[in-house]
Image (spheres, helix red, strand yellow):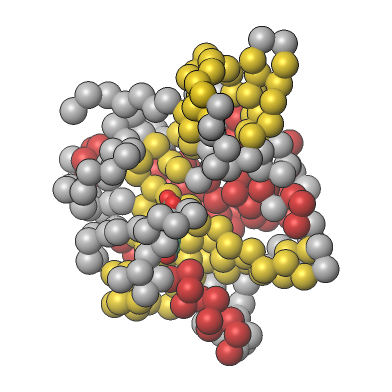
């Protein structure tokens, strides 16, 4: 059996490192890898994740959700997104979930999530949930979505390891709920936290712009957007939405 909490000064990517380690040894469910620095941190798609050394939470957590069919993998995204919001709430920050994997405050993006699954015979053999949560960094490069951090939001920083433990505890608690079948509450809370849900919003697709209202996300992780009387589903990458932040 493996360790439960692994800390590194520097790694290419905590997700990659955990995935490689799992090929070499048996690990406990819930094992966490944390790094002070990543030189090849990854985001969704071909995006990278850049973070100053020692300033922010860079963590990956291992789960074995064999009880979940691959089709229902989005439940894990709900669990992780809500857990980050829980942790931020404990730290006094109100956050929202921008589908599919961003955590936003009114000032910008405070965290990103990269969930990677290994699928065997239609079921999830293991999941690596990667989380980048900005804590103490106050200057960021210019991104398409402005970045923010706990310190920029509240004026106060936080100990990276303690926030890691907080996030770990929250993920585990919500994961236990998911395993026990308490999905209705998770879905309701997710919808309550979903950025722009129920609000008329401008969306952009390859065909052009349209106005619609987010109604939720289905079990397959597709966004449900109502336009007039019709509700359409969109996969990740099929649309962008207009984001609004407070002016600095
Ligand atoms: C995104 O916003 O596109 C997702 C960013 C996820 C970044 C985290 S940092 C820890 C873990 N290791 C990685 O290489 N990526 C995730």
Point 59% across, 49% down: residue: 77
Q: Residue at x 66, y 48 (%)?
A: 74
Q: Quadrant of ligand 1?
A: bottom left
Residue 91 sits in which quadrant? top left
Q: Quadrant of the N terminus?
A: bottom right
Which residue appears farthest toward the bottom when viewing the image?
A: 24
Q: x, y (%) of residue 54?
A: 24, 65
Q: Please provide percent x and percent y for residue 188.
A: 66, 31
Is 97 positioned to the left or the right of 54 in the image? Answer: right
Q: Nearer the viewer, residue 129 or 89?
A: 129
Where does the image place residue 101, in percent across and percent down from the top left?
50, 45
Q: Can you give x and y, in whole percent of width and height, for residue 203 in the image?
A: 50, 24
Q: Is residue 40 left or right of residue 155?
A: right
- The residue sitting at 56% across, 58% down in the picture is 115
Quadrant where the C terminus lies?
top left
Query: In the figure, 133 relative to 228: above or below?
Result: below
Establish if 100 lies above or below 125.
Answer: above
Q: How many marks?
A: 0
* Left or right: residue 44 compared with residue 243: right
Residue drawn at x 39%, y 48% as measured from the top left: 111
Looking at the picture, tell me which residue is in the foreground, 185 or 71. Answer: 71
């Amino acid at each position: 059996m493996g360790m439960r909490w692994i800390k590194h000064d520097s790694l290419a990517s905590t997700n990659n490192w955990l995935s490689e380690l799992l090929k070499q040894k048996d690990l406990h469910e819930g094992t966490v890898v944390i790094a002070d620095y990543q030189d090849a941190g990854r985001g969704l798609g071909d995006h990278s994740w850049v973070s100053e050394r020692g300033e922010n939470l860079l963590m990956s957590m291992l789960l074995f959700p064999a009880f979940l069919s691959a089709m229902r993998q989005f439940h894990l995204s709900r669990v992780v997104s809500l857990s980050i919001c829980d942790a931020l709430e404990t730290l006094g920050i109100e956050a929202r979930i921008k589908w599919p994997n961003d955590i936003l405050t009114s000032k910008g993006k405070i965290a990103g999530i990269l969930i990677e699954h290994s699928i065997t015979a239609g079921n999830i053999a293991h999941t690596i949930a990667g989380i980048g949560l900005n804590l103490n960094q106050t200057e960021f490069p210019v991104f398409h979505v402005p970045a923010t951090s706990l310190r920029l939001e509240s004026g106060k920083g936080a100990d990276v390891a303690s926030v890691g433990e907080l996030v770990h505890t929250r993920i585990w608690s919500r994961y236990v709920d998911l395993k026990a079948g308490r999905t209705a509450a998770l879905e309701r809370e997710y919808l309550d936290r979903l950025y722009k849900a129920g609000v008329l919003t401008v969306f952009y697709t390859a065909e052009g712009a349209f106005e619609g209202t987010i109604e939720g996300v289905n079990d397959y992780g597709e966004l449900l957007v109502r336009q007039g009387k019709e509700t359409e589903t969109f996969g990740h990458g099929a649309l962008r939405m207009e984001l609004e932040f407070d002016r600095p």
